[in-house]
Structures are given as structure tokens and as C-alpha cells.
Image (tube, rainbow, N blue to C red):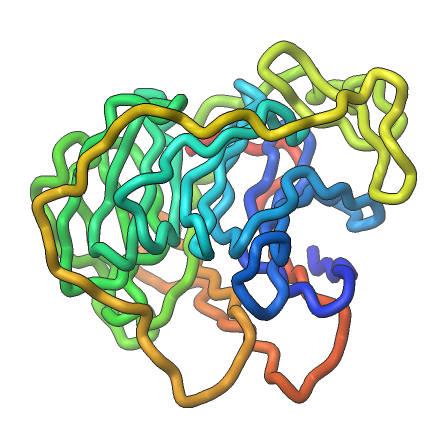
Amino acid sequence: MFMIVSLEGDKVASRLAVDDATGNIYFSANRPGTGIGSSYIAVVTPDGKSKKTLVNNLSRARAVALYSSKGLMFWTDIGFGAHVGRANMDGCKRKRIITTAIKSPNGIAIDFEEDFLFWSDGGRGVIERCSLVGADRQVLVKDPDAFIMALVIDGDKLYYTAWNRGGITVVNKADGSNKHFLMESPVFAELGDFLIVRPNKGTPVINQCTNNNGRCVGLCLPTPNGRTCARADRVGLQPEGPTCVEEPSSTTKTSEPSSTTKTSEPSSTTKTSDSITSLIIFPRLSALLIARKWRRQEKETSNITLVTLAVHKRLGYHL
């Protein structure tokens, strides 16, 4: 399936995640600049016809992760006030759960077996984890020479990429041990995001939106206690739809890890907007299936830019 979704003005889609119960696609979008309000997170139906903004007034939203069976979503913001955020999948109960000792949180992943949240910080060269509410924070990986980008949890392994390194690194998700490289190749340089797909394995994702679109006329958005029926932007919420406000940031105190090595985002001589880079890996197969990069040159003017390749049916699985 190939889908193009029109975004407002000069917005550029950055990262995306699929709600395996409904097929709805959650994505982050940015406009040039890193000022507050220039970025948001939205959801779009599988056919691309209905889009709703869920979290706005962000600076530069990047990674998005969904815990569909619990009705939760998480995101990272690498702009001013860099943070890791959490909200219900309808955009309510929004809260910044990690706000200190954080520079460039490029990637985010959920460990569905242990209920941990992992994120990468390219500016500090670390991968950290915490509980789903932001507690029990700890550094799992220190890799000061890497501008770490995306990360994926699969079984007892954690895989991650670095913008300045041609390879995928693998560590034990429990303690960061047994570090080694997988499939070293220049094609993995500047890799922004990737997936690991295990066909016919995993636990089916079920929530109140799974059957008959939750009996919603418009979008069915999972929540921890059920679901919210919502209509697309400029149409308004159905009567049961809530009005959402941001909650105070988490006050959990965290300390800066011992590593003091400072890194910065690699520079590029080609002026482009934010890029989408995708990789799909099938375990036990050494062949690279997809490694494509999309960049929109500054001279181009269009409203587009959510491009997605579906690799599973409407009903999916947590890996």
C-alpha cells in the first residue's frame, strides 16, 4: 500500500507508528525551525482520508511509540525543552515524563514484556530506560562516539543505529551487555528509523477499537479505560469526545549519567528538510529488504509528506 497524506502549510512528517488494533497511523510533523508550536503529533486513518491532531505546541517532535493494548502513546521532542512525553492515544492526559539530563532524544521503543520505556539520546551518546510513568530511570548503554538514532526491542535484544556509523548495534536489553555489530555496511549510515518484522509471531493487539471500529462514526482512539470517538480536524469531536489539557511535568528527580562526552548532530553540506529513512529487517535473513531515504529539497514547495509502506495487514502484532 502506498499512501500520500496532505499536511498543512510547510509541515514535514518525521516518524510514524501504527496502531495494530485499528491500522490508524500516528505520526510526528514539523515545520522549519524549532520554536514552540512548530510541531505536533497526529493520527490518520489507514485510507488517509481522516486526520486529527492530538498533541500540539511541541518544538520538534521526533519518535512516536504506541502501547495499543493499554491505550498509551509516547513521543520524543528534540527541540527547545527536549523531553520524552506520554499521553493517552486520544491525546489526553498529556505529560512530559523525562525533562532533565536530556539533549537529543531521537528514538523511542517499548518493551511490552517488561513494561519498560527505552529512548536514545544522540546528544549524549546514551540509551536509557524507565517505567511507563517515567520512574526508575537508568542508563543502559553508553556509546559516546555514536549519535544514536533509532532503537528497536526484539526478544531479549535491543538494536540501535547511529547517524555517524554504518552499522546496527545489538546489546542485551536487560543490562546493555554483549555489545556487537550486526550487518555493518555504509548503507546503514544516516539511517533514521527501522523495523524488525516477525511474520506470524507475537500477541494479537486487542482493545475497544478492534471490533467494528469501536462503533465510532469517525476515528476510534484507544485509551486506558476504553476508547474515544473523534472526528477529523475541522469536523470536531463527537459528544463523548473529551477536551484535553497538558498535565504538569513529572517531578521525579534524575541525575546526569557519569559520561561527560559531548556530541553534536552531524552537519550536512546539502540543505534538505527532515528526512524519513526506513529499514525493515526479517530476523534470520541476512538480506536487506528496504533501505530507502526520502529528502525534500528546499526548492520544492508542496503540502505533502507522509509516505508509508505497509508491511502487515490491518490487524498486527506486537513483536
Specify whether 179 is left or right of 168: left
Question: Residue 89: percent from the left, percent from the top?
Answer: 62, 29
The answer to whether one can see residue 67 in this image is yes
- Residue appearing at x 45%, y 45% in the figure: 76
Residue 255 higher or lower than 102, as above or below: above
Question: Residue 225: percent from the left, percent from the top?
Answer: 62, 10
Question: Residue 179: percent from the left, percent from the top?
Answer: 11, 49
Specify whether 192 is left or right of 274: left
Q: Residue furthest top?
A: 225
Q: Which of the two residues, 95 or 75, is positioned nearer the viewer here?
A: 95
Residue 229 higher or lower than 301, as above or below: above
**What number of labels is visible?**
0
Q: Which of the two residues, 271 or 149, is positioned nearer the viewer here?
A: 271
Specify whether 259 is left or right of 120: left
Question: Residue 33: percent from the left, percent from the top?
Answer: 56, 68
Which quadrant of the view contains residue 233?
Answer: top right
Q: Quadrant of the C terminus?
A: top left
- Residue appearing at x 14%, y 40% in the figure: 176
Specify whether 293 is left or right of 99: right
- Residue appearing at x 26%, y 44% in the figure: 101
Which quadrant of the view contains residue 51?
Answer: top right
Q: Quadrant of the N terminus?
A: bottom right
Which quadrant of the view contains residue 152?
Answer: top left
The answer to whether one can see residue 200 in this image is no
- Residue appearing at x 51%, y 43% in the figure: 64
